Amino acid sequence: MLTLRSGSGKWVVAATVLGSGVAALGATVVNIALPAIGRDLDADLADLQWVTTSYVLTLSAFLLLGGALGDRYGRRRVFLIGVVWFAVASVLCAFAASSGQLIAARAVQGVGAALLTPGSLAILQASFAPGDRPKAIGAWSGLGGLATAGGPVLGGWLIDVASWRWVFLVNLPMAAATVLITVRHVPESRDEARAARGGPIDAPGAALAVVWLGALALALIGAPSRGWTSPATLGLLAVAVVGFLGFLAVERRAWDPMLPLEVFHEPRFSSINAVTFVVYGALTGGLFLLPILLQVGAGYSPLQAGLATLPITAIMLVGSAPSGALAARIGPKLQLSIGPVFVGLGLFMLRDAGNGSYVTALLPALVVHGIGLALTVAPLTAVALDAAPPEHAGVASAVNNNVARAAGLVAVAVLPGIVGLDAESFTTGAGLADGFRLAMDLCALGCAAGGLLAALTIHNRLETAPEVPAFHCAVEGPPPCATEPADRPVTTHR
């Protein structure tokens, strides 16, 4: 077992930070590039939605399978495959000659992210001594947060000085450094019990996850133009329902399911994931539209649009750890009840972001929004992990992450059509301001509903705490950390 102070330990942290940073860049910089992509590739609104959605779709569908493959065949091996896969897909994205090619390449990129993302945390968990795991995870979170924060800024600068294609090519040096460090310094690890148990990989479950998520996304994105009651829309929704039921049936009977359904037997786990779905659906929908409004509607450059949202990340980096500590002392119910309300209030305040100066029209709203996220993220993560049995801590993390991403997939697919935005809105700005205002109103209500749901379903309960799992879930923010020695009993609130 490694220590964080050792040279080997620092190299392991560096490899996992770089790897997760590659995935973070792939997820954060593209929204900034959407207007430029639309102009260059003559992409309509549905195409731009799919540029985002195809990545989230395959990432969500294969994330649990990626974790299972790492546990069985070696976490370092699957992590390396994911990094190389992601890099190759980034090249395909950069040289895409049409929106269809870019969408397909983004789907391939999402598979690579699904292979490397669970491996980064699993490697830290397996490599470090128990006393150093919280510190290693904390270093990973803080340094990884810099990639999340810097992604939109770097992407905006590259678009300004070169082209949106460099948003994807910038991944290559980071991927190369990750591979080099991992090969030289990261030890191999696997779940020996799972590997010894053998049996087939849950490929049918992964395939059905792609089917039902893909059919749902196709139905929701195309419904505004085809009609919600058209045969195509209803047929795709039917495929999504049948695929989802088939997925549940396969997971119930699989030898080694990628999603053990018993984790949902705990009501608190189901409740916190319902809260996650509502809050992150509203949050993702709003933040998908904000960079487009700033560039198309308010005349921001891509770099300015990237810089505009930095206050959110700064507040998250500073406030998440104290928020987690507060929830450990008083219980998560209060923060999970009021935090989403602040998130929604910030979105509501953004409804006129295209009018006025940055200081008056955006900054106050972003500060309120960031405070709400800082209040919400760590308690939500702690409850999601603590509600599942200890042997399923990794699955709980992946499930909560997947729920957040699936909520974002649905929001990006549905929201523009609901508020009346079309292809012309995203190119000329016609009707963009009015549609954006309505979208922010709906997203704010969604966040408030998430806070109400938490108030009604999440309860504080005192009991002896288990070891804090070294995972975090829905957001790229600092995980909850143990502040007491491992041999000293602590009290936690559920």
Image (cartoon, rainbow, N blue to C red):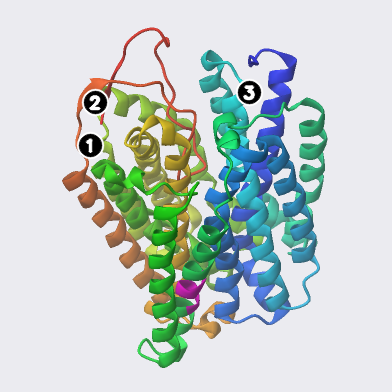
Q: Observer-nearest residue: 428 or 267? A: 267
Quadrant of the image containing the C terminus: top left
| Percent x, y of residue 179 | 79, 39
Residue 443 seen in this snapshot: yes
Labels 1 and 3: the sequence-earlier one = 3
The structure residue drawn at horizontal position 30% and vertical position 60%, both measured from the top left corner, is 446
Name the residue beneath numbered marker 1.
Answer: 334
- Mark 3: give few (<14), some (14-19) or many (20+) Cα within 10 Å: many
The structure residue drawn at horizontal position 40% and vertical position 73%, both measured from the top left corner, is 242
Name the residue beneath numbered marker 3.
Answer: 127
Q: As shown in the figure, which amino acid type bears the numbered disc 1?
A: Leu
What are the residue bounds of the magenta stretch?
A: 214-218
Q: Observer-nearest residue: 326 or 275? A: 275
Measured in 3D between alpha carbons, the distance from the residue under mark 1 to the one under mark 2, in whole angstroms, is: 8 Å
Dot 1: what SS? Answer: helix
Magenta residue check for 114: no
Question: What's the mark number on residue 330?
Answer: 2
Q: Are the residues at dot 1 and dot 2 in contact (C-beta closer than 8 Å)?
A: yes
Left or right of residue 81, residue 359 in this image: left
Q: Observer-nearest residue: 211 or 307? A: 211
Measured in 3D between alpha carbons, the distance from the residue under mark 2 to the one under mark 3, in whole angstroms, is: 32 Å
Left or right of residue 489, residue 255 in this image: right
Dot 2: what SS? Answer: helix
Q: Are the residues at dot 1 and dot 3 in contact (C-beta closer than 8 Å)?
A: no
